[in-house]
Amino acid sequence: MPVVRDLRVLLRLRDFRNLLAVRLLSQAADGVYQVALATYVVFSPEKQTSPAAIASAMAVLLLPYSAIGPFAGVLLDRWRRRQVFLYGNLLRAFLACVTGMLIVAHVPDWVFYASALSVTAVNRFVLAGLAASLPRVVDPGQLVTANALSPTAGTLAATAGGGLAFLVRLVASDPDALVILLGAGLYLCAALVSLRLAPELLGPDHPPGVIHPSVGEGIALTVRGMVAGLRHLAARREAAQALTAMTMMRFCYGALFVMLLMLCRYAWSDNESDGLALLGVAVGVSGAGFFTAAAVTPWMVGRLGTLGWITACSAGAAALVPALGLSFAPGPMLVAAFVLGLATQGAKISTDTVVQSRVADDYRGRVFSVYDVLFNVAFVGAAAVASLMLPADGRSMTLILCVAALYAATAALLGRQARCFT
C-alpha cells in the first residue's frame, strides 16, 4: 500500500523518529495527567458532578492558558524549539509532582486547579512547537503523510497513556496521586529524549546578531507579532478556511464529549467505577477512529484535496451523529465515538497540512498558537452550551440535533470552496 510505503520512508529519517518519540512520550504523559484530573473532578465518589461543574472545570483549566497561546507562538518564533521540548517537559514533570502532593494533602479546589493549570499552560508551548517543527524534519512532499502519522500517533499515545492510568487506578490504593506521578515520569522521559535532537535543527533560523528583547519589549512584540500573524493567515484563504471549519468541528466534538461524560457517569452505570470503565472503552474506540483516520487521510486527500476531505468528514458526522446517537444506547454511541474520532482526526490532519504548507516558517509558531487557542475556546464554549442543554443523565435530543446541524452547515459552507483548491 502507498501509505505503508510512505510511512516506512518517514521512519527511516532519524530526526523525524526522534521528534516523533518526543511527541509520543509527551502526549502519553498528557493522557495520563488528563485521566487523573478527569477522574478526580468527575468520577470521585464524594463529588456530585453536573454538566455545569464539568463546564466550570474545563473553563478553569483551558480558558486561562488559552490567553498564553498567542504569546507562546511569538516566543516559539524566537526560542530554539528543541530547548522548549527539553525545559518544558522538565518543568511539567516538576509541576505534576506538585499537583500529586496537593491531591494527597486534600487542599481546596482552587489550589488544585491552579497547580493543574500550570502544567497545561506549559503544554501550549510544547504542542505548538511540535507542530511548527515538523516541516524541519521532512520534505514538503511528505507533509501530508507526516501529519497523518505524527499528530495521530501522539493522540494514540495520549489514549494509551489514559488506558495505562485506568489500569493503575484498578490496582493502586491511592490512585489519583500515583497516576499523576506516573505522568510526571513520562514528562521526564520526553525531556531526556529531546536531547537526541540537535539544538539548532528545529529552528527557527535568525540572522546573525539578533538581540533577544526585554520582557516589556517582548510583550509589545507579541502584540505586533500576533497582528502580523493574523494578517499573514488572512491572506492565505485556504488555511483560514480550514482553521474555521476545524474550530466548528471541535465545538461539536466538545459538546458531545460532555454528553458522553454524563451518560457514562449517570445513565449507563450505577457507580463511579463502572462509569469510569465505560468512559475508558469509549476513549479507546475513539482512538481506533484516530488510527483509521491516519491510514485513510493521505489517500483521501490525494483524491478530494485537503478542503474536500474536511468537507467529507463534516458531512459524514452530520449524517451519522443523529442516526447513532438518538437511541442513547451504549452500543450505537460507541460506534458514534469511532466515527467522530475518524472525522475529527481526519479533518485535523488536513488542517495541519494546510497550515504548515501555506504559512511561512517565520509565522508558523504564531499561527499554530492561534490554532490552539481556537481549539480550547471552542471546546470550553461547547461545554458551556452543553451545560445549559443537558439534563442530569446526559440525554438530550436537542443537543444531538443541533450538533448535527452545525456539522452540516460546516460541510455546506466549506464545500463551496473545496473545488477551488483541489
Image: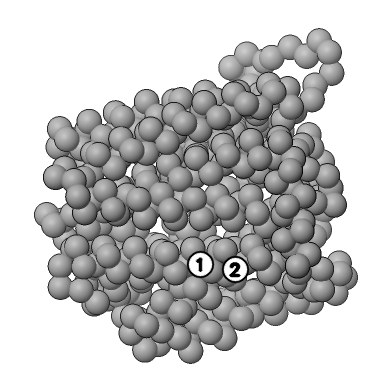
Q: Residue furthest left?
A: 46
* Label 2 sits on residue: 292
Measured as percent of width and height from the top left, residue 387 is found at: 34, 67
Please tell me in which quadrant of the rendered image residue 197 appears.
top right
Task: Please indicate whether residue 176 sits to the left or right of residue 313 in the image.
Answer: left
178 displayed left or right of 251: left
Which of 109 and 311 lies nearest the eye of the viewer? 311
Position of the N terminus, as image quadrant, is: bottom right
Q: Is residue 401 visible?
A: no
Identify the residue at image location x=85%, y=74%.
Answer: 419
Residue 229 in picture, x, y percent from top left: 74, 41
Measuring 69% from the left and 23% from the top, which residue is drawn there?
198
Determine whether 363 is above or below 47 in the image: above
Residue 29, by quadrant, is top left
Quadrant housing residue 110? top left
Near mark 1 (Cα within 10 A), the count class, few <14, some 14-19 or many ≥20, is: some
> What is the secondary structure assignment of the residue under circle 2?
helix
Q: Report the amino acid beneath label 1.
A: Ala
Instruction: Name the residue nearer the viewer: 218 or 37.
Output: 37
Residue 154 percent across, percent down from the top left: 55, 49
- Please give the name of the residue rendered at 59% of the width and 56% of the height, measured from the top-left corner: 152
> Which residue sits at x=37%, y=33%?
184
Q: Are marks 1 and 2 in contact (CB under 8 Å)?
A: yes
* Image side of residue 187 versus residue 154, left or right: left
Residue identified by numbered label 1: 288
For label 1, the SS is helix
**Residue flagged by tag 2: what amino acid is it?**
Thr
Q: Which mark is residue 157?
A: none
The span from disc 1 to disc 2 (Cα, nearest Å) is: 6 Å
Relative vertical location of residue 121 with respect to residue 146 in this rendering, above or below:
above
Quadrant housing the C terminus: bottom right
Q: Is residue 154 visible?
A: yes
